[in-house]
Every structure is written in structure tokens, then in C-alpha cells.
Amino acid sequence: MSLLCLDFKSIAVGLDATNMACALGDIEILETSAKPCGNFHLLAQGENDLILDIQKKLSAEYDQVVDSCTVQSEIKELLNALFGLKKIEISDSLLILETETLSTGIFICSKFTKQDGTTLIELDSGRANGGICVAYITGPEQVLKSLEQEILKDRPPFLRNLTNITRPNEKFLKYFTL
């Protein structure tokens, strides 16, 4: 099973592409969302080859695709974080990631689910943040510092900000809510 995320710079085009994706094969639409800035995202899951085929066809068909990604493993943790199904527990450090598109947020977070000791707490798709995707990742200080450096080295085009709060203050943790 794979996860597909496509970000569009037009709501109308995003809806048309969603319709086309449904016509191309047996996929499950997990979420579509029009954002306050006029952008739109499609989140769907399906069999690996079909998802890759849909991503390729929609990206070629629509010039309004701003960003896209597919994730072929560890999608359960991403979905739990995206839909708020995880209990909030901050361990050693807290990494806060902001991206301009959900696709970039999912792509970066999929790397975190593969690292020892890290937990993706929440992945906010940007519906209430003016289209800005925000992710909260917790884990050992050294692991998060290493991942932060790796992300900044590659500098994905839609990355807005990356902040690592090492050893958060107890007062902060007491009142911190996602």
C-alpha cells in the first residue's frame, strides 16, 4: 500500500485531478482540502504501482501541480500523525518543521519514521494554518540534530522553517498542546 499526496495551485484543477485519479484506478481518497490561499491538496492511498502511475499521469496532465510525493512504507505512522490519532509525548527534544506544501511535509516526515528513537507526533496538513504544513517530531537530541542537518543539507524547495528545541523546559511541556 502506498500514499500519494499532490498539491495544486488551483482548487478547481485540484478537484478535476481528483476526479481523474478516481477514474484511473481503485484508490481510496483520504482527504482533499481547499486552502485559504487558493491551493488544494489530494491525499490518497492504493496499491504501489497504481499510485506511482497516478502521480506520473496527473503531474504530466496538469501544469497546476506544485508539489507531489509518494510514500511506499511506514504510512500508518504518517496517517496517525496527520489525523491526530497519536498521544502527545515529548521525549528528549522537539523538532518543528514548517513546509509550504503537504507533499514536502509528508516526504520529509517519511524519513523520520525510519530513524531509531524518533516519533512523529503530529502532521498538520495546513487547513487552519493558511496552507502551511507543520510537523512535530520528538526523539533523542543527537538523532534530531543529525536529521536536522541532513534536511538542511538537501534544502527541499518548499521548506519554510526547521526548529529544534533541545531539552524543552518543564513549564513549556506542561502547557504545550498540539
Image (spheres, helix red, strand yellow):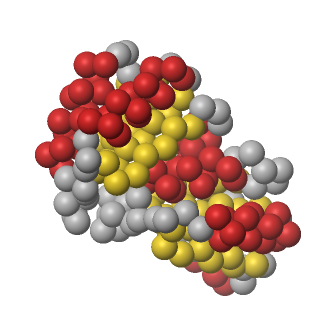
Residue 84 in percent (x, y) is at 49, 49
Is residue 83 at all visible to an observer of this figure? no
Residue at 19% x, 60% y: name it.
Answer: 38
Is residue 126 left or right of 153 when viewed as pictured? left
Task: Tell which of 161 and 87 is nearer to you.
Answer: 161
Residue at 60% x, 55% y: name it.
Answer: 108
Position above or below: 42 against 57: below
Which residue is situated farthest in the top direction here?
26
Residue 14 in percent (x, y) is at 23, 43
Position above or below: 12 against 108: above
Position above or below: 29 against 163: above
Is residue 128 left or right of 80 when viewed as pictured? left
Q: Quadrant of the N terminus?
A: top right
Residue at 65% x, 36% y: name it.
Answer: 74
Residue at 43% x, 46% y: name it.
Answer: 68
Is residue 62 left or right of 53 when viewed as pictured? left
Residue 18 in percent (x, y) is at 25, 33
Which residue is situated farthest in the front direction here?
60
Q: Residue 93 falls in which quadrant of the image? A: bottom right
User: What is the tally of numbered marks visible in this picture?
Assistant: 0
Q: Residue 114 falls in which quadrant of the image? A: top right
Is residue 143 left or right of 36 when viewed as pictured? right
Is residue 27 at all visible to an observer of this figure? yes
Residue 112 in percent (x, y) is at 69, 53
